[in-house]
Structures are given as structure tokens and as C-alpha cells.
Amino acid sequence: MPYLDSHEPVLSLTTGPVPAYPAVLRAMGSPISYDADPVFQHRYANVVETARVALRSRSPPVILQGEPVLALEAAAASLIAADDVVLNLVSGVYGKGFASWARRHAGEVIELEVPFNEAIPAEAVAAELRRRPDVTVVSVCHHDTPSGTLNPVASIGTVVASHGGYFLVDAVSSFGGLDVHPDACAADVFVTGGNKCLGCPPGLSLVGVSDRAWAKMERNPAAPRASALSLLDWKEAWRPGRQFPSTPLIAEINGLAAALDLYLAEGPEQVWARHALTAAACRAGITAMGLELWPARAEISAPTATVVRVPPNLDEAVLRAVARQRYGMVFSGGRGATAGLVTRIGHMGPSAQPIFATLAVTALGGALRALGHPVALGAGVEASLAVIDEASRSP
Amino acid sequence: MPYLDSHEPVLSLTTGPVPAYPAVLRAMGSPISYDADPVFQHRYANVVETARVALRSRSPPVILQGEPVLALEAAAASLIAADDVVLNLVSGVYGKGFASWARRHAGEVIELEVPFNEAIPAEAVAAELRRRPDVTVVSVCHHDTPSGTLNPVASIGTVVASHGGYFLVDAVSSFGGLDVHPDACAADVFVTGGNKCLGCPPGLSLVGVSDRAWAKMERNPAAPRASALSLLDWKEAWRPGRQFPSTPLIAEINGLAAALDLYLAEGPEQVWARHALTAAACRAGITAMGLELWPARAEISAPTATVVRVPPNLDEAVLRAVARQRYGMVFSGGRGATAGLVTRIGHMGPSAQPIFATLAVTALGGALRALGHPVALGAGVEASLAVIDEASRSP
Amino acid sequence: MPYLDSHEPVLSLTTGPVPAYPAVLRAMGSPISYDADPVFQHRYANVVETARVALRSRSPPVILQGEPVLALEAAAASLIAADDVVLNLVSGVYGKGFASWARRHAGEVIELEVPFNEAIPAEAVAAELRRRPDVTVVSVCHHDTPSGTLNPVASIGTVVASHGGYFLVDAVSSFGGLDVHPDACAADVFVTGGNKCLGCPPGLSLVGVSDRAWAKMERNPAAPRASALSLLDWKEAWRPGRQFPSTPLIAEINGLAAALDLYLAEGPEQVWARHALTAAACRAGITAMGLELWPARAEISAPTATVVRVPPNLDEAVLRAVARQRYGMVFSGGRGATAGLVTRIGHMGPSAQPIFATLAVTALGGALRALGHPVALGAGVEASLAVIDEASRSP
Amino acid sequence: MPYLDSHEPVLSLTTGPVPAYPAVLRAMGSPISYDADPVFQHRYANVVETARVALRSRSPPVILQGEPVLALEAAAASLIAADDVVLNLVSGVYGKGFASWARRHAGEVIELEVPFNEAIPAEAVAAELRRRPDVTVVSVCHHDTPSGTLNPVASIGTVVASHGGYFLVDAVSSFGGLDVHPDACAADVFVTGGNKCLGCPPGLSLVGVSDRAWAKMERNPAAPRASALSLLDWKEAWRPGRQFPSTPLIAEINGLAAALDLYLAEGPEQVWARHALTAAACRAGITAMGLELWPARAEISAPTATVVRVPPNLDEAVLRAVARQRYGMVFSGGRGATAGLVTRIGHMGPSAQPIFATLAVTALGGALRALGHPVALGAGVEASLAVIDEASRSP
């Protein structure tokens, strides 16, 4: 009785799009304002200011009117000029992918790459910068989602700053789920969005830009202007009384406002703890069940996604199809180099609930068994619960 | 880290209010119509007709503007007259409670009672009616929710019909979750509502009334009129062009319309199968974990709630508080005679998802352990999953 | 091209149901909580407290789970006992109608009636109470909506208090639109609801009850208990940790919470000013167009509805049908004694916008002309605008 | 009493963003799906197919994940290559603005320009193409919104087709409000969006592309790929089973689905008639009031916006501020060359209601008077109503 084939799944624990917070969805149903109306302009400026507070940044971020892939492309096009040498740090598929945008604009792009289940040590970046003192821009993906691994952006940022380079950080699927902020990692361009740990639908990007990065963009004759890819267009255009370069996505702005309010009301530290506990409960269950995690070690595992190595000789897509068909549970597959090798369980915003980790372990275990792969399902569930139980005893 | 104390729970698996279907909540946000507007009047009549189809009834039900407790009170007040002898069938707290309404209006109320974990055999009703041929009305609660047990209303209905009595059925928490309909059980008054298996918020009741019951009410001088408790007021008043006796609850009507559409679109038989599988998966997990069910046997267990006997020496309220605090999972306690003795897991409408049964077993097991009561948690989870897996192999 | 016949109208300016505030509709789409969940219980208690603040009352009101017609019936049944002599004040259809509920419970009901376009002077009440010192309860409808007239409840309340009687006030369609509150008019029972000037859908009632009225109800053996009509059931039952007598209408509670927040955030005095200006603009336009108002004079005209006398030889229902068909504008007709004689334009909550008054004048004028009745439409529009313009020049 | 300064306006009749249809806003609150989930992929394909039907096109359009300004930039970048000579037709600010995108990619851009209150005759295009037989691409804005004028795209399309050029049509603010479709005007690229006459919030674009235009883009080495500006990326990527180039804006897709359903359910011809009647009622009122329209004559006036010449010596921004402050009515100002000269009243989707035209005339007249400019307000209202009344008498 595969009763779910033509129905919405019961629970979506993917690495995105994530299920939005109900309050965000309700806010998106607010009446649509005229973008030049003073009440809307005031609201927009408030959203920017709330985002600035959430980003713990001195300067207001820019909201771009598209999901973060647009913002990453825009960041590369705006910041990177023909005379730049870019050091692109690669620990996964998304880090690797950024090079293709960088190459469109840079004089040269060099790469420092580690295996895709590893993280890039700050020391290695320092060494590379000593080797290539002409590097002007360093780019990194903080949470390379197809791997579920975190790069140490704070220490890398220190290295880049002392080198004098510009530091471009993709924090799309990490900001809001753990302690990462533009100023704290000395980022010159810090790209994130509402549609991961903040619990919005895809639609908007947040881009933190340092003063020196703004200056560099303004000097860059090839930086997009009068374009959907322009950061410069939006730099001050959101201030009340000015004219937006293009129509803002009103409903998404209303949703982002609600998401930022939720984030600050719950308390960032509380939100991060919720993500961390969910991930810990998930990893414990997965390993107790006899499965392996993709990241080389726990310290570099992201709290926003648990990436599970699929046992050999199993079709990963079939595995997920079985979990959906039997249990209504949806996970993500790998991407690029990790496609077919891993199944990914997201813990982002509304899906970062510890008990969902236990349920994910249950459903993944059940699906593996259904495909003839024995797992210690009961042990997995117990180990996952034990992590939650232990946390509940802490002060 | 009891992070959930001041937050909404993660998942509510109670016996009601149940989490409404998202489409129902969206429909409730439709613009509020003037109740005398022709478009609204047409829509109201459509809802009545759709409800008639869902109830598989020849005649249109009445929608009362309050949740089903109001409708049960109204049904007693409307149907039962001073010259009636009521046989009230009692297999649980709600059945027992109906007598208090019946006694306000009846000449005499007698009761046939079984233990609250049992069901009432049709034969016993037949015997009682032979003993008391002066009985004019028989009342029964189909699913006595505080016990999680079902009475055999179809066979009791046959008995009552052959006796010539009026049959009043409380199907509040069963209709929509299994195969029960007014005509099929020969009910004269059949009370249900949107807020259980149809997945609406509490707000409206559906009352099926047979032609002879209408006639009896019209003969009853004490039947409420010009009252919120009046069935007669609403008999024909909903037809387009007439005036509603009081303002209908517009938003709730919009929600009910959406809920009935969902029910018919998924297909009643599919919906019942979903409830049945969820309950089977829940019962299997609970018993495999070493716990006992409240109903005396599976055949009388409702597919819309699993009622678990709490082990001795455990405080049931604390048990649920722990499940909520640690896992964000909410269950119902007992009520009246079953309060303190049982924990109830609801499977109604949106919560009737098989994998939720497995999660309920997990969370209840975890909470029991936290209170020092050992359970075979892993075995429970495995048994629950096994039921789902078995179903997925059926054609 | 009667393009609107099968469509929702463009704008509904009726005396209720009113179009709900968008924020109220969004709140109603919040996830449905289990009513015994501590977070919901806390929220419910907050709504009661916010309602108390809005009512400017010392003691918390009771929320009844039905629209105000249920609450009025419940108030009569709870307060009025067999040894009571009720003086029912009648200045319109609703005041008249209350007598039918009072007679069910009172020893005797006497009436003081004025023409239905007039208000009841406090002096007349005083005189009647001198004539019948045995009167124990005085009941009045503050805004008799089918007439659009206000009774002076504050001064009548003083008279009743000095007489020592209980004072029951129906403020359903006035509270929230002007300065009327239970303590300020010495009401013992004050019935209102969310679905008029607060801008909720119909669903809930607010009932303010004085300490002495609670004591009277408790002494009344016939006061409803274990009933949807019971005020006593709900007196303290809403306090966290107790059990609700019946399931609260969760979605409606969420909507009411939002409506009360809106009311207090805009500022009651601002809200009343908005209603008053809308009504003034409407009356000015109607009279300048050559039509007559139903109320005998402006001082007794409610700011929440403008009631227009329909010129002789016109079919009032056809008049409204034309306004809807041509312009998509919906108004209310009369009710009972005023049916056929008047068309009513509501100014309640979201519909209390001055410019809507001008639009109502326009549409009503257009419809009258379409039926062959000449009106000074342009003069009406200008007079209506002039009132708004004048107000905008005030400090 | 400028009570509206800090509040949402009462009614927004701008040229966009327009107030979304309530059903669209509700649909946007649907649960957010994982974009790779088969149910979502099926839904996305359905939206494309419904859009194809609405566009009356043989081939499926592409949905771009941004509002139409992004799509216009993407269309220019994708279609126009270095060896192209573009003839850009200019009858207003938006047509003029397109040249800046065209110049980025074309070998040469020439322009045919008429005064901004005029339309471009097809004959003039034919003459220009005879003069410059090397023109390969012709671009035009159908409804140049800052002017409220329509270009004859069907006849221009015939001219371009016989010339053998590619025809790029900006139909952003016309499609859905009148009879314009890609195949019917022989457009090779036809750009529109949900956020004007379809009644969505800004967020998505619809781009119809002819087979030969797809072939041209594929031959164009500079056409964006792996970019938010890429049409090619999306050509087939939306088909179930493939991977979206970037995450679709799930909520906006849900909203667009609802909007297209509404459009087809009401009936396109009915929708256009509603727009046309609204515009006619608006123009009649404006001129009867003594004001002038911006378009040179009625035949080239768009049914989706009425553009009013502001009397000399009046500050247009102040005029709109007064209309908002006094009446809560919001209009658009001009843009670029028309800024300060015109006030624009939008009739798009939900705002295309004839009675709103009368209200706009009223509010604009009132605001003019408030600024000391006399207008025949009553005459304007009467003339506007007369148009509606006349239409209601037609069969």
C-alpha cells in the first residue's frame, strides 16, 4: 500500500528547501504593499536593520531579490576584477563550483583542495598565501552542504586579513544554525539567505559587505550595474525615500521579517543549541545503527546536516524513494561528487528538532532494511534518544 | 535543557483538538463574506451537500455553529421528550456523560453498562429492550474516546430499528476515520464534527437527522427553538434565500468546505486505511515494548486513538510532561474514570500517519524510561515499523 | 454585463459579518494547539487578560464559544431567575427580541418601548422603575443595529444602579467602535463579541460579568450548567491548569488575540475616531443626496452603522441587488420591523474607513438612479468628502 | 487628523506591485516542498503547462525565478549577440530603458522613437526596416507603463516576421489584462510576469520563447549559462526528474499556480472586459472632471493603467501624498521622463474593478481641490458611474 506516492510527504528533512516556519508562511500572506509606499519603505528598512542585528554586523547587509545562488554569482561578479588573483578553497562540491563564477571575472583562479570529507586548515591557507603573495581574494564555502562539513572560517579569516586579501564567505546553509557572522570571521563579502536555517522559503539573499569591499566594487568597472546581479545598485537604494532598483519581492520580504523576528525572539544561542542537539542525536543514531558518516570526524561535521555514507551496492535514489513511499519521510541525496554516495538529513530552522533526528534514524534504518541491508535499528533509535535524554538532564 | 517548555510542541498526537490540515487553515483565511450574500449562501448550501455525500446519507445534515459538545446537548434537548424512556448505553466516560443531558428531558433514563474497556454487544441491547419494551430512545457513543473503544453501532442500530426506537449516535471522534455513516447504522440522530478525523479546528458540528426524528422533534413542545441549541431552527434555514437563525461561523464554514473536499479527494476508503494502519502500527509498537492497551481486545479498539495503560506507580501527567519537555511530543491523558490510568495517542485526520505511530512509541518509551520504568524501546520501534513495512508489500 | 453575479463582491459594507482584518485572518491560520497544552492555556489566559484591558474592566470577561446571539441567550438564562421582574427596554428589533429569552426565565417581563427610530431616555427608565419598584433586572440593547440608534447606557446604568437592579447590556455591535465599557455603564452583564467592531469572523463572544451578577447566577438553580449556554461553567475554567468545559474554538481564539492586539495598538480612541468620521461622512453624503436617515436625530445615530430610509415605492432588496450587481457593493437590509424600509451601511472595524463612506454614498446613489429614483449624487459625494477634508485640517 | 500616516493605506491602485488576489496569498502559505520531491516537480510542470494555456502558446514558457526586470535583462543577454543589429522601438521610459541592456550585447542598437504619449505605427517600423535591412532583432514594450500607452504589437510582429527579424516583446504589464499573446503577435521572446494583471506578488517571470529564438540562444556563445540570467539553463530543466538549475521560489510558484487557475476560471475574455470597463470608467471620470489624460488618444490607452496629466504648478508627489493621507488611496507617480508630470491609476488584476475607478476619480479630485485646484468632482463621479451603468445594461 504505497499510499504516499501521489501525496505530499509527511515530513521533509532535506538540506533545502526546508519547511518554512508557520509564522513565516502566515506573514507571506500579508496584503501586498506598493513598494514606494512610505509604510512599506519603512518596513523594508526595518528588515535590513533586523538582519544587521541578526548578522551581528556594524553595517547593514544588502537584500538581493533572489535565492542565494543568485547572490553568490552577484558577489563574484561584483567583487572580483580582472586584476584579481583568487584563491578558491575547495572542500566540497559547492566550494568547487564557485570557481566557475570566479573565473569569469578574475585574472587567475588558483585552488587549494582537500578531500571532500575533510575541512581546510587555516594553516594550509596561510602556507598557500605565502606561496602566492599575489592572491587578492580568498573564497570559501563555510558549510559545504553536499558534504556536511564546516570549514574554519574564523581562523581562515584571520589569515586572510593578515595577508591583506578580500575574504568571500558562502554561509548560505550555516548562518542561523550556528555561531557564524561576517565581522567575526572578517568576511568582506558574506552571503547567506532566508531559506535555510532561518526557515523562509527560497526567495531572498542577505549579503554582508565590508566597507573596503564596497570600495573595491565601486572601483571595479565590470561590477554589474543596472542588473539583477548588481550589489552596487542596492547599496543604499533600500533607504526610505529612494527608489528600489527593481521591485522587491514583497511577500518574501514580509516572510523574512517574520523569520528574523522568530530567530531573535527564540535567541540565537538557543537556536544554535537546538541545531547542535539535533545533529548530535542524528549522528549518534546513525553510527549506532552501524552506518558511517561522510565527514572525516565529528569536529568538522555541520550541525545543520547529517551526511550518511550509503552502504556499497545500494542505489541511493531508491533508498530515499523507499523512505518516502513507506514512511513519508524525505531526505536529500548527494550532489555532484557525492551524488549516489550519501544521503543527507537536514537540520535547518523548523526541521532542527531533536526528535526528528530520531525519526530520521528510524526511517532511514527501515528503508535500508527494506532493501536488504541489515542495520541495528533499535540500537540506533536508542542511541539517538540517549543524546536527547542526556541533554535534558543538563542544567 | 528543557528547551521546549515555553514553545509550541513539535508534534501533537492527541485525541483532539487535532492539528488541522494546512489546506483547511488556508481556507479559513479566506475573506469573510456577508452571510446573506448570495455567493456565500450558495457556498453554504454546497458545504451541506458535500457533507451529505461524505455522510453517505439521503438527507442533508444540519451544521450547528459550535463544536460537537454543543450538538450532543442540542440533540438530547431536541429529540428527547418528557414521555420518552431512554436506554443509554455506557461503555466509557462519554457514554456515561450523555445520561446527564438525557435526564434533563426524558421521563426515565435507564442504562446498560459494561466495563470501560469493553464494548456493548448488540445482543445485550436486544435483551434489554425485551426487558423494557417501553424504551423509546437508545443512545450510544460510537468511539468512547477516553477508552479508545468502539461500540458495534451497525448491529445495535438493527436491534433498535426492529424494536422501533429512535437511535442517537455520538460519532464525533469516529466519523471520517473509519466506515461509519448515519444511514448504515440506522441512526436517527448522528452527531459528528469537523474537528476530529476531518482535520478542522473545533467550531462546527454535523448532525444527521432522519425524517422520523425530525417529525419527533417537531412534535416535541420542549425542543429548543430560537436557541443556539435548536436543531429545528436550522432544519431548512440554510437554504439559499432564507435567513440563518444566527450568524454562521463563516471562517469555520470555509474550513469545513476544504476539509470535506480533502476527504472526498483522498477517498474515504483510503483515509480509513491510513487511520487503520496508523493504529495497527501504534498498537504493535506499544505491546512489543511491553506495555498494555486499555481496550480488552483489538477488535474493539478504535483506529482513531490508541489508549495505553500507564504502568502502576507512575504519575500519568508527569509522563506526558516528560514526553513534551524532552521530545516536544504531546499526547492526551485519560478523562474521568480513565484519568491517571491511561495515556492516549490520537490518530485523527492529519495525525493519522503511520510513521507518527512509530514516533509516538519512541517518545512514550523514552519518557517511561526517563521515569525509571524499563521498556523494550527498540523492540517497540521495530514492531511498529514492521506493521508499516508489511502493509507496503500488500498489493 | 452583470459580471459580478457569481463572484465575490468587491466590497462588503454590511452590519456584519464584517470583512475581518487581514492580520486576524492570518492569525486564524496558526497551527491548531491541543487545548490542554500549557502553551495554549497560557495564550488563552492572555487573551482573557487582553480582553479585560480592552473592556477597561476590573474583572476578567468570559469568552463563550459561539457568536454573540448564543451569549445573549446564555446571559438571559444565567442571570434571570423565576423570581425576577425584568424591565426590557425596547427601541428596536433586537431590544424587542431579547424579551423572548427573558420570558423563558423571568417571573414577569415588562417593557418600556419607544419608536424604533428613537432612543430611550434615562429619565423614562427612572420613571418606570419608580412605577414598578419590584423590577430586579433591566435589559437594553446599546446599538439596536436594525435601527442604527444608540441608547444612553451610561445614564441608564446610573439609574438602574441607584434603583439596585441588575443591568444587562447588549453591546454586540457597539463595543470597539465607540466609548462603551461595562464598568463605565455599570453593567452587570455586558455582552459583546469579536465579529463586529473588532474585525473578527463570527465565532466568539465576550461577556463581562460583575461580582454581584456572578453571585446571582450562582444562587440561580436554573442557571445553565454543563451546557453550551452556561456562563458559570466558564467562570474560572479558563485559568491555566484547569480543564475547559468544552473545547475552545482554537482558531477563533487565535483570531481574537490578534484583533485585540490591533485594537490596543491602534489605540481605542483612534479607532473610535475612525468609526465616528466614517459615519459622519456617510450621513453627510446621504442627506446631501436628498435621502433621509432612519434615526430621529444625529445625536442618537450610531457611529457603527448608517441606516438610510428607502424612498417609498422602491423595493429595498432590489436596490441592494442592483448595487451589488453593478458596483460589487454589498449593504445590509433592514430586519424585522425595519425590513424593507431601510438600507444599512456598516462601519465596523475594517470597514470603518472614511473613504468607504463616500464610496457607499456613490454606489447607493447609483443604484437608486438605476431604479428611476433621482438623487443628487454629485452633491452627496461632495458633502461626504467635505467631512473627511474638514477632519484632515483639524490638529 | 491625518490618521493614515503610519498605517497601511485603505486601497492601493498603483501600476504595481498590485494587491494580490486573496486566493494567491493563501496559496503562498502552502507548506514549502522540497524542490526535488516528485509531487513538487509534478506541480511545477503543471504550472508551466497552465501558463502555456494562459499564454495560448504552442510551446511551454520558461519561468524565471525573479521579477520581470530580471527576465528582460536575461532576455536581452540571451537573445542578442555581438553580430546583431537591434531596432529598439521607443514610445516611453521602459522602451527607452531596454536599449541599455541591448547595447551590452548587440553590435549596434538603433532606435525608432515617438513622443512618450504616442504609439509606434507598424508602418514606421516597416519603413525603418527597409532603411536598415541589416536589423536582426526588434524590441518593443507593449504597454509602456510610465505612459499608459499601448504599441500595436500584433501588426508590428507581422512586419518583423516578414522582415525575418527576431521580435522581443515586453508584455509585463499588459498580459492578462487584455488580448495579447506571444504566438498571436509573432513574438520570439515574450516577457511577462505574475505580478501585474495576474495578481501575484512580484517574484516570478514568464518568458515565452519561439523555437528559432531557442536556436539563436544556443548558437550565442555569450548567452548566459550557469547564471540567474540564463534562459537556456531553464529550457528543459523544469521537467520532472531533472534538476532545477537553482532552487525555484516555491511559495511564488504556489501563488502563480493559483493566479493562473483564477485567470482561466474567470475566463480570459471576462478578465479583459473587467479591465477594459475599469479603464473606460476611469478615463470618463478623469476627463469629465476637467483633467487631461497623458496618452494622445483613447485608442492607444492601456486598459491596465490610466495616466493623468497633473495640472501645471502642482507638485505631483504632494498630490499623491494628500490622496493617501486624507483618503488612504495610493496611486503611482510617473517615472523618468513622466515623473512629476503624471499620476497613474492602476487597473491590474484585483484592482481592475470598475467601482474602484470611480473611487479613484473621487479621491484624485478631492486631493486636487485640497491643493487649491478646482475640479468638477461631482461631474467626474457621475461620468465614471455612467460608463459602468451603461455596461450593465448591455446583454
Image (tube, coloured by chain):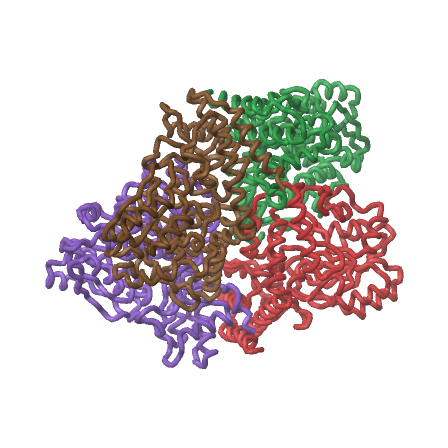
Chain colours: A red, B purple, C brown, D green
Query: Is residue B352 shown left or right of residue A350?
Result: left
Query: Is residue C142 shown left or right of residue A363?
Result: left
Residue D184: give x, y in percent of width and height. 60, 26
Query: Is residue A288 shown left or right of residue B301?
Result: right
Q: Quadrant of the C terminus of chain D?
A: top left
Is residue A143 visible in the rendered image? The answer is: yes
**Quadrant in the rendering for residue A170:** bottom right
> Foreground: D203 or D185?
D203
Q: Quadrant of the N terminus of chain D?
A: top right
In this view, D192 is above or below C228? above
**Quadrant in the rendering for residue D224:** top right
In this view, B104 is above or below D226? below
Residue D327: give x, y in percent of width and height. 59, 36
Query: Is residue C82 shown left or right of residue D57?
Result: left
Residue B64: give x, y in percent of width and height. 32, 49
In this view, D153 is above or below D237? above
Image point 78% across, 66% down: which residue?
A: A156
> Foreground: C381 or C82?
C82
**Quadrant in the rendering for residue C187:** bottom left
How many marks the image carries: the answer is: 0
Residue B306: give x, y in percent of width and height. 37, 67
> Foreground: C322 or D168?
C322
